[in-house]
Amino acid sequence: MSSKGIRIEGLKKRYGGGDTAVHALKDVAMDVAPGEVVGLIGPSGSGKSTLLKCLGAVIDPTAGRMTLGDEVIYDDGWKVRDLRALRRDRIGFVFQAPYLIPFLDVIDNVALLPMLAGVPNAEAREQALELLTALDVHHRARAMPSQLSGGEQQRVAIARGLVNRPPVILADEPTAPLDSERAMAVIRILNDMARKFETAVIVVTHDEKIIPTFKRIYHIRDGVTHEEAGEGRGFD
Amino acid sequence: MISLAGRDILHAWGKFVFTGIGLGLLIGVTLTMAGVYRGMVDDGRALLDNSGADLWVVQKDTLGPYAESSSVNDDAYRTLLAMPGIAQAVNVTYLTMQVRRGDLDVRAMVVGIAPGRPGIPGWPPYLVAGRQITRGHYEAVADIASGFRLGDRVAIRRNHYVVVGLTRRMVSSSGDPMVFIPLKDAQEAQFLKDNDAIWQSRRRTGANPAFNRPGVPDLLDAVIASQSTNAFVNAVLVTLEPGHAPEEIARSVGRWKRLTAYTRPQMEEILVGKLIATSARQIGMFLVILAVVSAAIVAFIIYTLTMDKIREIAVLKLIGTRNRTIAAMIMQQALALGLIGFVVGKITATFAAPLFPKYVLLVPFDSIAGFFAVLAICVLASVVAIRMALRIDPAEAIGG
């Protein structure tokens, strides 16, 4: 596998200590190449959310190693200092619900990230508009989130996740509230964007409709990941 | 970087504006309360200014004539005039009472002014209509705030007076409009009893063997005559010749005349520091309560607005927004709310002040101090919401 994208080796996460310690992640290994979309599936309580939070630099793992692009971001207790900047610049998030900022219009919802990184407003909006055009929602650039359909909101959310060109996108149940047609449209967009922007995409899902679309799937069970080949149906 | 606070306010402007108006009415009440206090102080100063005196000579060891009752013999002014440095010494009486005009009943301070001419202490220094009192009895000059008009006949005790002149800003320290009448009438009004009381008094005196001696028939008449006249005034207003220090003359009066004399600063201290001190503390308590209530309202509103945005704040934190950006957003919203509230409050107070029955003086200093107090309260009130926002875990944006 490529050295770009995201690589996780021997990742562990323990909550608490002593007899009451909970080992949420026991041995997680993943390697997702740029431009690749992989599925992460598992039953409730298997450690999916904990893994997502570790990948998203929201909580610290207990042990293991994570590499993002060329940069080691966690290595057995050592971690990069500025996790906030890491999340802003190097990780894109797409949530189950779009969670757009209701008081910002579409273009500023997307442009907010580069603005937070210090990019001038006009330039940030240009970047945002470019992505909105790629996702075919540029005509709603000045609309408020409440004026968009569910599918449009999700596309805007994907644009927000991509706007800083992160090496990895973490998508948490991105198709859960959508019907089959829209769910497939979202997965198609994620695949297109992954290829176009050379981004590794990890999709956490329970959605039976979209599981056959992944070429590789990571199953997580009792805190341990197992890789298997997927069907990769529909996205060559 | 765009203003998150500004965008949020524009997005929910109706909520902000209406909340700001509610807060503004509270701030308006606060500014008006401060104006009431300032008005009381100004009334006290106007009272002293308008009396035209350099010294107030009153009954020994009293704080008269405004803060305590004071009786001075009405011939004391002659001996004061004989003292070096005193230019004018004029008797004056003050009596707060209900003055009637037909069915109208006005609380007023009736001032008895000595015969003379405009410009001597005690007289209204200027008129806005009519003329000064020129007759020895039954004419009056009233402050326009009393509601009296030229030609009105007003009743003070058993006598009626014709309003011949109107003046302005002549009020007592408690804001009651003044009605000026001739001194003799005022002295009579202060001690005038009803007919039954006079009859009873004469009967008691007549029954007293000490006054009704068979061998001294004129004694009873003399005693009764002395009982039915009033030879006292409340104070003597004194002006000084140039070059004489008021403190020195006041000390001299106290030493030689068995009276107490107050200078202007001392009288101001009595009025502001003693007479209206309790009212000032009362208003101060109200101001503190209103400030606390305002802070609680702002805190509650900002906290509620922030609670409504927990998920958005979690998303903002997850995508890398700095804590200080989120804190600034909340604080700016609190300040915006305070700003809207202050503008509404200032406008409310400005338009409401003239409607109050007593003088409400809105001074720029209070407005400026109030503005900064509102901002400080808003900053403090936003602290609770900021603490809550900073405790929001970015992981809340991620399911599970």
Image (cartoon, rainbow, N blue to C red):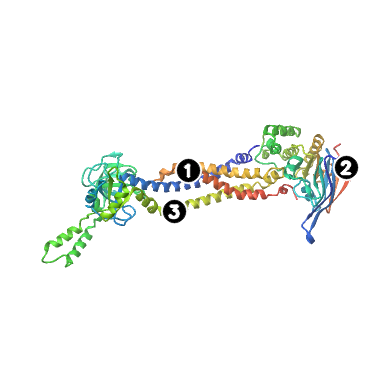
Same chain shared by disc 1 and disc 2: no
Q: Amino acid at mark 3?
A: Arg
* Chain of the residue displaying label 1: B
User: Looking at the image, do the residues carrying marks 3 and 2 touch, with CB atoms under 8 Å apart?
Assistant: no
Instruction: Count the marks.
Output: 3
* Chain of the residue displaying label 3: B
Instruction: From the viewer's side, name the closer residue of B354 and A233.
Output: B354
User: Which residue is painted at 37% across and 51% down in the image?
Assistant: B269
Q: Nearer the viewer, mark 1 or mark 2?
A: 1
Same chain shared by disc 1 and disc 3: yes
Left or right relative to B56: residue B312: right
Can see residue A40? yes
Q: Amino acid at mark 1?
A: Ser
Q: Which residue is mark 1?
A: B367
Q: Position of residue B50 (x, y in %)?
A: 32, 44
Please rate how many residues cluster around mark 3, counting C-alpha atoms within 10 Å: few if below 14, some from 14 to 19, many from 20. Answer: few
What's the CA distance linking mark 3 and mark 2?
82 Å
Q: Position of residue B242 (x, y in %)?
A: 29, 42
Q: Quadrant of the N terminus of chain B?
A: top right
Name, please, the residue furthest toward the right. Answer: A229
Question: What kind of element bears circle 2?
Answer: loop
Left or right relative to B200: residue A187: right
Can see residue B109? no
What's the CA distance linking mark 1 and mark 2?
73 Å
* Chain of the residue displaying label 2: A
Q: Which residue is mark 3?
A: B281
Q: Which residue is mark 2?
A: A231
